[in-house]
Image (cartoon, rainbow, N blue to C red):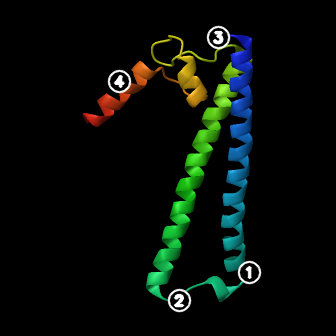
Amino acid sequence: MRKTELTKLKTMLQKEKEHLDKELDHFESLLLSKTMKEAGGDLSSCTTHKADQASDIDENQKLFIIMERVQKRLKDVDEALSKIENGDFGSCRYCGKKIQLERLMAKPHAELCIECREEMDASENNH
């Protein structure tokens, strides 16, 4: 991989990291504000009907699930950036072959070449 391509991928990853950090901050502040309102005794946003309470719990669970996904993606991006710094970037985690540039341009934090990814997907679908 040429240095210009690696620089472009690093820039893409850094921009994605910034975006994910902002997204995570947003969700954390949203969750914190809900918690602070409830802890502070602001009952205006609290519901008393069981269906509404269930809906509130469901919203919080969705928020946690989204936050987990963002954190996972952020971890993947951080690992890719670390691999660039260490000179290990662009190799498939399973077979060790170079990941195609087109794949990395589409998904810079990819850890698998397309062949291994397809093999893994096929294996998961058979179970």
Q: Is residue 107 in view? A: no
Q: Nearer the viewer, mark 1 or mark 2?
A: 2
Q: Nearer the viewer, mark 4 or mark 2?
A: 4
Q: Quadrant of residue 35?
A: bottom right
* Mark 1 surroundings within 10 Å by alpha-carbon count, few (fewer than 14), some (14 through 19), many (20 or more): few
Q: Quadrant of residue 122?
A: top left
Q: Is residue 117 left or right of residue 23?
A: left
Q: Which residue is mark 3?
A: 1
Instruction: Report helix, strand or loop for mark 1.
Output: loop
Q: Which residue is mark 4?
A: 119
Q: Residue furthest left?
A: 126
Circle on res. 48 = 2
Residue sitting nearer the eye, 15 or 29: 15
Q: Nearer the viewer, mark 4 or mark 3?
A: 3
Task: Name the residue rendered at 67%, 79% in the picture.
Answer: 38
The residues tagged by marks 2 and 3 sit, at their Cα atoms, a distance apart of 60 Å
Among the two numbered marks 1 and 4 on one chain, the one whose residue lies closer to the N terminus: 1
Q: Contact, CB < 8 Å: mark 1 with mark 2?
A: no
Q: Indicate the amino acid at tag 4.
A: Glu
The vertical placement of 63 against 49, above or below, is above
Q: Contact, CB < 8 Å: mark 1 with mark 4?
A: no
User: Residue 102 appears at what percent x and percent y?
Assistant: 55, 22
The residues tagged by marks 1 and 2 sit, at their Cα atoms, a distance apart of 17 Å
The residues tagged by marks 1 and 4 sit, at their Cα atoms, a distance apart of 52 Å
Among the two numbered marks 2 and 3 on one chain, the one whose residue lies closer to the N terminus: 3
Q: Indicate the amino acid at tag 1.
A: Gly
The vertical placement of 127 against 101, above or below, is below
Circle on res. 31 = none
Q: Is residue 10 in view? A: yes
Q: Which residue is mark 1?
A: 40
User: Residue 34 appears at what percent x and percent y?
Assistant: 67, 72
